[in-house]
Amino acid sequence: MITILSGSNRNDNHTLKFAQLAKQLLQKTTKEEVVLVDMAALASWSVTGDMYGNTSQPAVIKQLQDEIIIPSQKFWFFVPEYNGSYPGIVKLVLDAISVRDSKESFQNKKAIVTGVASGRAGNLRGMDHLADVLNHLGMFVHPNKLPISSIYKYMDDNKMVVGEEIKELLQKQISQLLNFN
């Protein structure tokens, strides 16, 4: 299983649109099951001290971990730039999952990272920050991170991601992800 994580919990976020396009392209390229996790859909749980307990994890986090994170061998993170890094929801989810069955969730698994930003750097710093955390959890992060900058040039008037250039960039990263062993 390959899991794509759209790392924004903002309503109607653009990161999800890039992740959805990546999922479509990836499904055309592989026979492996591809799952998209929209972090905006995880809004049903609240931040409490109980989320760090082995037996008191929120049900949505336990289900995410048991049904998606543990079975997945490869991950594709799409992270927007928030205040010079990646969004707190990504770190919060990683922290919550790492409490229970951390080795089964992360150890020796592969990850690739795509940054999404309206500015010109494509979240370069945030991708490095995330790679450091993923490495700390025991994951191998592909060295070629894709910064997608000036995202609006890839979006039409309806805010849909379009164009061959972006598809080619994502297709290159798909190839790298699938060949990352």
Image (tube, helix red, strand yellow):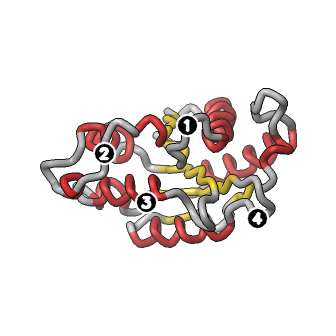
Q: Which amino acid type corresponds to the residue marked 3 in the rendered image?
A: Lys
Tags 4 and 1 touching, CB below 8 Å: no
Residue 103 lies left or right of residue 81; in this view the side is left
Q: Earlier in the sequence, mark 3 or mark 1?
A: 1
Q: Which residue is mark 3?
A: 91
> Marks 2/4: CA distance?
32 Å
Secondary element at tag 2: loop
Residue 7 place in picture, x, y as percent = 53, 49
Q: Is residue 173 above or below residue 85?
A: above
Nearest-to-viewer mark from 3 and 1:
1
Residue 167 place in picture, x, y as percent = 79, 40
Task: Categorize mark 3 by other alpha carbons within 10 Å: few (<14), some (14-19), many (20+).
Answer: some
Q: Which residue is mark 1?
A: 11
Residue 181: quadrant of the picture: bottom right
Secondary element at tag 3: helix
> Marks 3/4: CA distance?
21 Å
Asked if one can make out residue 181 in the rendered structure from this viewpoint, the answer is no
Who's the residue at 38% across and 40% down the image?
Answer: 68
> Marks 4/1: CA distance?
23 Å
Name the residue nearer the viewer: 167 or 175.
167
Q: Which amino acid type corresponds to the residue marked 2 in the rendered image?
A: Ser
Task: Categorize mark 1 by other alpha carbons within 10 Å: few (<14), some (14-19), many (20+).
Answer: few
Q: Which residue is mark 4?
A: 121
